[in-house]
Every structure is written in C-alpha cells, then in structure tokens.
Amino acid sequence: MLENKTALVTGASRGIGRQIAISLAAEGAFVIVNYNGSKERAEQVVREITENGGKAAAVCCNVADNDACEEMVKNLIAEYGRVDILVNNAGITRDNLLMKMSEQEFDDVINTNLKGAFHTIRHLSRYFLKQRSGRIINISSVSGITGNAGQANYSASKAGVIGLTKSVARELASRGITANAVAPGMVDTEMTEVLSDSIKEQMLAQIPLRRIGNPQDIADAVVFLASDKASYITGQVLTVDGGMTM
C-alpha cells in the first residue's frame, strides 16, 4: 500500500508512535524513526522493523527546537531524496491542576506537542509543495476536543493541533497535499499506565465499546490516512476512542 514512500514519524521510540512506525513499515514505507530521549528504544524499533523485512532508520531531534527541526529535514532530504508522509506524534504531559500549574509546565507541553508539529510541517511543506504531494497526519487527542481536568496545558496543545491541521489543510490542498488529525481516546500506553485504577474505571465507564484502546487501533487509522485510499480526505479529525466523544 505504501511501497516507495518515505515516512517521518516523530516520537516513534515508544507507545503509539512506535506502533505507527511499525505499521507504516509493514505496508512498505521506509520509516524514519524520530526520537529525542531514548536512542536505544528507537534503535530497537528499527531492528524490529528490519527483522520483519521492512526498512527504517533512527534520527534524533527535539521537535520543540525549531533550528534542530530545520536541520533534520534538510539532512533527511539530502540523504533520502524526499519525504512523502509526516506523522506528528511526539508529545509529553505535565499534568497539574490549573492553579498549581507552573508556566514552565505549560510551556513545555505547548512547545513539544503544538510547536513541534508546527516546526516539522513548516520545514517539510516546502518539499511537499515541490513534489505536489504529501500526507500530514497529526496526532491530537480527545482531550483537545472535550478538555480534561488537570490537563489545561495538554488539552490546549491538542486543541491547537486540530486548528493547525485545518489551517494547513486549507493552505496546501491545491497542491495535492492532505492534512488530517487523529484524536485517540483512552489508549493503553506508558502515558496512561500512571493513572490510578479508579480513574481508569471512570474513563472506561464513558466508553460505549467498554474497552481501552491499544496503539494498533491508532496506527491503523494513520496507515489509512497515509494511503491513496484517503486521497480525497483532508482537514478532518478522526476520533479513535471507542465512541467516548460521540
């Protein structure tokens, strides 16, 4: 489905990003596994992909750093010739009640989750425009749609990602470039492992399908949006949440 395509997945060393990278590679894409913190984990993702017959490479870059993003994109184009698919998955949490939240906690989340997506899109868009093709898929969250107590920073960043996605879709559509967002609900990852059992039970009660999602659920949606089957879809937010927000 994605043969001869090159995909950049940010924050791909663990969780949802890891599964997205693996799933894109399984469909034939050459996947650039971006990481910031753990080189070992990123290289493990690359090994898993290559051992299963896929193609991948690991690249370190803090997407919150604009200059570093620009350098990464230049290097990728110089080395691989083109990038066809961009998945902005890199994200962090710094949860706290609004009155206790520090400016640093707010800024850290905005800089990675929202500005990080802006940086990669900004620097890759010029190449997408030259190619007259490209797929941009931004990972948002249901928290960006409904809000979430204790996550003013995270919810604001993910709501911003939705607005960014729609604006980018309008700006780039005439050149055959699509931009969509995927908004996961409750997904079983390291981020959600820290939640107490009582909070998980409360969230589960809000899910009509009565199960917590898994990274593969999100990866399948991303693969679809990255494929030619989604060529007439742009500016949309696909919630993958078991019906939580319907």
Image (cartoon, grey):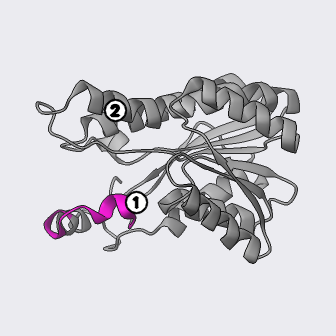
At which x and y percent is residue 79? 85, 42
Type of the residue with mark 2:
Ala
Tag 1: Cα neighbours inside 10 Å, few (<14), some, or many (≥20)? many
Q: Judge left or right: residue 136 versus residue 82.
A: left
- Dot 1 lies on which element? loop
Tag 2: Cα neighbours inside 10 Å, few (<14), some, or many (≥20)? many
At horizontal 39% and vertical 30% (from top left) the residue drawn is 110
Q: Judge left or right: residue 56 versus residue 68.
A: right
At horizontal 45% and vertical 37% (from top left) the residue drawn is 113
At which x and y percent is residue 41? 55, 62
- Dot 2 lies on which element? helix
> In the image, is residue 122 above or below residue 140?
above
Q: Quadrant of residue 17?
A: bottom right
Q: Judge left or right: residue 174 versus residue 4.
A: left
Q: Which residues are magenta?
A: 188-199
Q: Quadrant of the C terminus?
A: bottom left
Residue 169 in view (yes/no): no
At which x and y percent is residue 54? 78, 68
Q: Quadrant of residue 76?
A: top right
Which numbered disc flags the more N-terminal residue, 1 or 2?
2
Residue 197 lies in magenta, yes or no? yes
Residue marked by disc 2: 156
At horizontal 56% and vertical 41% (from top left) the residue drawn is 236
In this rendering, the label closer to the viewer, 1 or 2: 2
Q: Residue 209's mark?
A: none
Residue 89 lies in magenta, yes or no? no
At horizontal 75% and vertical 70% (from top left) the residue drawn is 50
Q: Quadrant of the N terminus?
A: bottom right
Type of the residue with mark 1:
Asp
> In the image, is residue 35 above or below residue 121?
below
- Distance, label 1 to label 2, CA atoms, is 19 Å
Residue marked by disc 1: 241
